[in-house]
């Protein structure tokens, strides 16, 4: 005996326009299976991706909700009528939680000049005057005025974020200009905050810019963050990243995250009240030295532009309360493949900083947490070091020294010390037979870190006449051979 | 410039919500009355063909109780039992449920992720932002075919009777 299933108005287009579909079935589950087999378009509206009936889809047998009968196994017989009944739910979500902004936006006005400036925003239904006022009422703190901070600052200022704070203590170096588009050649040697302020005030004089010429520390982070609605991490080192995360968790602020390396980048929004925090994803930092910084590993100059603009987009969306944020998702970008991937992130119930049984209740020493300790010379270490001036005089004297450069071939191509041999650090173990322990060997890299590792490997293998060039070829180029380019 | 339009198919897709200004005013007032909690209600009427275009013509808006027993400041609920009786009553009056309205206290009149996850196709979701007790912007939204986002639905003022 066919049993009729009554289809509610919104689902009829997916059931061939019918308000009723008849199926042959003995239970509710069977009936729904017949229905979706005949009309597959219904599936995504009735079931979640993992095949469960959506929570707001209710099935009635005659006048009874199957939740109060036997659920999907409720038997049905001739004469019964099945009805799919919507329950209607909704409400303000995460973005609405920036509710101080809404209250403040109520008192904000836009001048005619501002209305004209933001006209392309104002005509979008997702922004309108109301959204633009939210932007003006909002405050965003950007940590770092470098690669990520540049596009972040530029687009957030252009978008009309009312108050923009920037934390940085660096001066503009010529190696920054390949990617840090806030600064220019005229600003070399000057504080980054100076050129940032000049550029951003010129771009949008309606934005109130606050600059903090200081390193972000456990002592000042909470005080700095407290006055801002959204925190954006534009730094790229582990101690600051954990510090920004923990301080944001403690103050219940969204932390818009980005990171970059060579051709690859990541972005997410960490907001403990709504989803996972950075520590849910990475409870512990990697051992120091394992993940190279941009200065060590390099970065495609454009990459911080892409990732920084994604961070700026997320920031603006949070303020507007529009769309779906990156909360709970890690976006991975690969410029070489020109592809985006996405990982789902879950809140870690054992998270030490945002979990229910959290063990960290205040900011800690993040340098120490990340294994970065001030360098203390080990006993006897000095005898394995040689200063550039000493190396120079020994070479001038005609001493027979074997200089081994442990950098990569493409670095060797940029500059090298005449007469040096190239054995990249990674090849030292398998190529040490090319060296003689009878020779006196001088090891160097760019700044001295990799050559110290090479020295340790060779010492362990029985070499003893070893010296590490202090400060690497970079110091050699500054003090001994100014004709060499530096990088 | 690209713009997404209600990408639905079939007869249920409409290209606008036709509603009287007094009904919009009633939605705003309900949002203010319920503040700081969320208010919700029904949009009743008929799908009409006007000049070759389908519009949802609202004939009345009905207040409903927010049936959430917790978090009423940021959630609303219309239970299936209420829906069923409202649907039957509407049919007896020769109209149908065209959608729902709800308020977003101190939040913008855009659908939240929670709204999207709980949305049905076809229905109009009118959201009114209520800030510090004052109703402000009001928008209507329709779920996109693939459920990934909402599209803004044009609100067309209808003539007062």
Image (cartoon, rainbow, N blue to C red):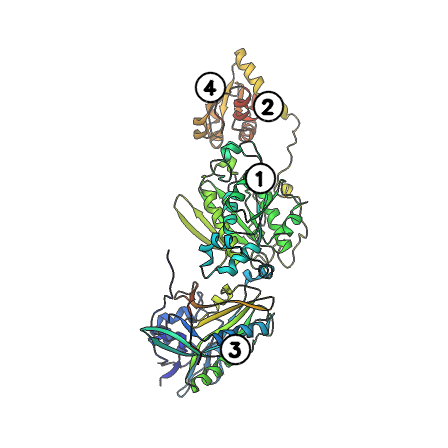
Name the residue beneath numbered marker 2.
A385
Q: From the viewer's perspective, is the residue at label 3 or at label 1 nearer? A: 1
Location of residue B19 with respect to A341 vertically, above or below:
below
State which chain disc 3 sits on. B
Q: Is residue B122 visible?
A: no
**Residue A311, how many percent across, how many down?**
50, 50
* Mark identifier at residue A418: 4
Circles 4 and 3: CB atoms closer than 8 Å: no
Depth check: A59 or A478 in front? A478
- The structure residue drawn at horizontal position 65% and vertical position 25%, both measured from the top left corner, is A380
Co-location on one chain, circles 3 and 2: no
Query: Marks 2 and 1, Cα distance to the nearest angstrom?
Result: 38 Å
Find residue A167 and report its image quarter: top right
Q: Is residue B16 visible?
A: yes
Name the residue beneath numbered marker 1.
A193
Name the residue beneath numbered marker 3.
B79
Mark 3, secondary structure of its residue: loop
* Mark identifier at residue A445: none
Crowd class of label 1 (few under 14; some 14 to 19; many from 20; radius 10 Å): many
Depth check: A332 or A386 in front? A332
Query: Marks 1 and 4, Cα distance to the nearest angstrom?
Result: 40 Å
State which chain disc 4 sits on. A
Co-location on one chain, circles 4 and 3: no
Location of residue B48 with respect to A410 vertically, above or below:
below
């Amino acid at each position: 005996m066919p049993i009729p299933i009554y289809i509610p108005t919104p689902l009829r287009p997916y059931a061939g326009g019918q308000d009723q579909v008849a199926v042959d079935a003995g239970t509710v589950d069977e009936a729904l299976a017949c229905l979706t087999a005949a009309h597959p378009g219904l599936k995504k509206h009735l079931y979640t991706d993992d095949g469960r009936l959506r929570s707001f889809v209710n099935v009635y047998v005659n006048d009874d909700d199957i939740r109060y009968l036997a659920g999907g196994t409720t038997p049905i017989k001739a004469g019964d009528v099945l009805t799919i009944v919507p329950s209607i739910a909704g409400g303000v979500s995460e973005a609405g939680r920036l509710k101080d902004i809404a209250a403040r936006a109520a008192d904000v006005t836009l001048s005619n000049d501002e209305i004209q400036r933001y006209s392309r925003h104002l005509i979008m239904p997702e922004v309108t005057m109301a959204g633009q006022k939210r932007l003006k009422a909002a405050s965003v703190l950007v940590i770092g005025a470098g690669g990520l901070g540049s596009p972040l600052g530029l687009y957030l200022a252009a978008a009309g974020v009312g108050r923009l704070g920037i934390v940085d203590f660096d001066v503009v170096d010529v190696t920054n200009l390949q990617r840090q588009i806030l600064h220019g050649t005229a600003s070399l040697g000057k504080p980054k905050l100076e050129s940032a302020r000049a550029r951003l005030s010129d771009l949008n004089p309606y934005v109130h810019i606050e600059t903090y010429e200081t390193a972000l520390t456990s002592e000042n982070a909470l005080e700095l963050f407290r006055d801002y609605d959204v925190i954006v991490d534009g730094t790229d080192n582990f101690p600051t990243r954990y510090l920004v995360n923990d301080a944001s968790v403690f103050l219940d602020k969204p932390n818009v995250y980005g990171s970059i390396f060579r051709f690859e980048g990541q972005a997410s929004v960490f907001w403990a009240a709504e989803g996972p925090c950075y520590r849910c994803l990475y409870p512990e930092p990697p051992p120091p030295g394992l993940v190279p910084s941009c200065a060590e590993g390099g970065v495609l100059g454009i990459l911080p532009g892409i990732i920084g603009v994604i961070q700026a987009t997320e920031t603006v969306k949070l303020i507007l309360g529009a769309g779906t944020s990156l909360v709970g998702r890690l976006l991975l970008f690969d410029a070489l493949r020109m592809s985006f991937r996405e990982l789902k992130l879950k809140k870690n119930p054992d998270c030490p900083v945002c979990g229910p049984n959290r063990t960290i209740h205040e900011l800690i020493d993040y340098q120490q947490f990340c294994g970065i300790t001030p360098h203390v010379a080990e006993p006897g270490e000095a005898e394995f070091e040689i200063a550039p001036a000493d190396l120079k005089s020994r070479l001038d004297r005609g001493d027979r020294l074997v200089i081994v450069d442990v950098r990569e071939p493409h670095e060797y191509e940029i500059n090298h010390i005449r007469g040096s041999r190239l054995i990249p650090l990674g090849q030292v173990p398998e190529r040490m037979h090319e060296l003689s322990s009878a020779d006196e060997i001088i090891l160097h890299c760019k700044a001295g870190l990799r050559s110290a590792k090479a020295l340790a490997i060779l010492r362990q293998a029985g070499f003893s006449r070893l010296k590490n060039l202090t400060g690497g070829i970079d110091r050699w180029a500054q003090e001994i051979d100014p004709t060499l380019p530096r990088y | 410039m690209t713009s997404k339009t209600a990408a639905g198919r079939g007869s249920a897709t409409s290209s606008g919500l036709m509603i009287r200004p007094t009904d919009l005013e009633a939605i705003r007032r309900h949002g203010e009355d319920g503040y700081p909690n969320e208010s919700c209600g029904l949009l009743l009427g008929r799908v009409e063909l006007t000049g070759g275009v389908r519009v949802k013509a609202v004939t009345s808006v009905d207040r409903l109780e927010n049936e959430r027993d917790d978090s009423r400041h940021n959630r609303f609920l219309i239970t299936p039992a209420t829906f069923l009786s409202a649907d039957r009553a509407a049919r007896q009056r020769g109209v149908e449920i065209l959608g729902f309205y709800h308020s977003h206290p101190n939040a913008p009149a855009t659908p939240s992720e929670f709204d999207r996850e709980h949305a049905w196709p076809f229905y109009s979701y009118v959201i009114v932002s209520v800030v510090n007790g004052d109703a402000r912007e009001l928008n209507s939204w329709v779920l996109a075919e693939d459920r990934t986002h909402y599209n803004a639905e044009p609100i067309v003022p209808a003539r007062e009777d």
